[in-house]
Amino acid sequence: MANWQPRFTSADVEITEQERLCDGFFKISRLNIRHALFEGGEVEVVREQFQRDDAVCVLLFDPVRDTIVLIEQFRVGALNRPNGPWLLELVAGIVEQGETPEDVALREAVEEAGAHIYDIVPITRYLPSAGGSDEYIELLCARVDSDSVGGVHGLAHEGEDILVHVLPFAEVCEMVANTTIDNAATIIAVQWLQLNKQKLLQRWGCL
């Protein structure tokens, strides 16, 4: 089995000073950090860290109809995107205290897409922007029945306005390839499904 261990650990890092710069919807801190160097000695750097809770993104796949359920919504981080700040994405949500990733997937599938999940398969866990953010993404794939899924969803008190799309698997793959879909979680999940679709269909008895 392939494995790798980093040269250093958390014990080789010291935060010598910390200042909270922003304490709103998101949090930002300025950190003075001292850490070990590969060729010996230490270095001191100042970095801003974007701090937010971990999130779960779930690829909703209907193996019977060979369709994927994606959602379209406004994203402030995409304001300068050439095609505008509305993205096609996976259903996703923040992990609240006491929740498992599976809990989040079940909750958000209903809230954002009106979809009910029948089985959940883990894909991976990753840092989307380790150069500045401490957030981890838990990426999952879930089986759904897309026949009655659609419409506009989201929680009004959270300012959500979410349009649901049910799209053929092949069409979604094409949109990833031509960069119509350009957000990391969706790209990773769709490419994972391309590699693992047959195993998934076997697991769900759809071959």
Image: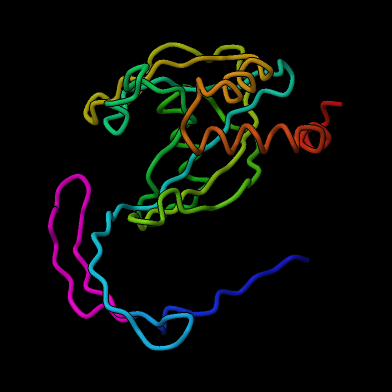
Residue at left offset 14%, top offset 62%? 20
Residue at the farthest right position? 207
Query: Which quadrant holds residue 199?
Result: top right
Given residues 150 and 36, the one toward you in this image is: 36
Q: Work out whether 105 lies above or below 19.
A: above
Residue furthest to the bottom in view is 41
| Residue 64 image offset from top left, x and y in percent | 74, 19
Q: Quadrant of the N terminus?
A: bottom right
Q: Residue at position x 40%, y 50% from top?
A: 129
Instruction: Reply above or below: 199 against 53.
Output: above
Give the residues in magenta.
14-34
The one nearer the camera, 176 or 172, is 176
Indicate the quadrant where residue 35 lies: bottom left
Tell me the residue at 41%/84% (across/down). 11
Left or right, 142 with respect to 196, comes to left
Vertical placement of 18 versus 166: above or below? Answer: below
Q: Is residue 114 left or right of residue 79?
A: right
Residue 17 position within the rendered picture, expressed as x and y whole percent measured from the top left: 18, 76
Percent position (x, y) of residue 203? 80, 38
Give the color scheme: rainbow, by chain, secondary structure or one colour.
rainbow
Q: Nearer the viewer, residue 35 or 51?
A: 35
Q: Where 66 falls versus 138 (above or below)?
A: above
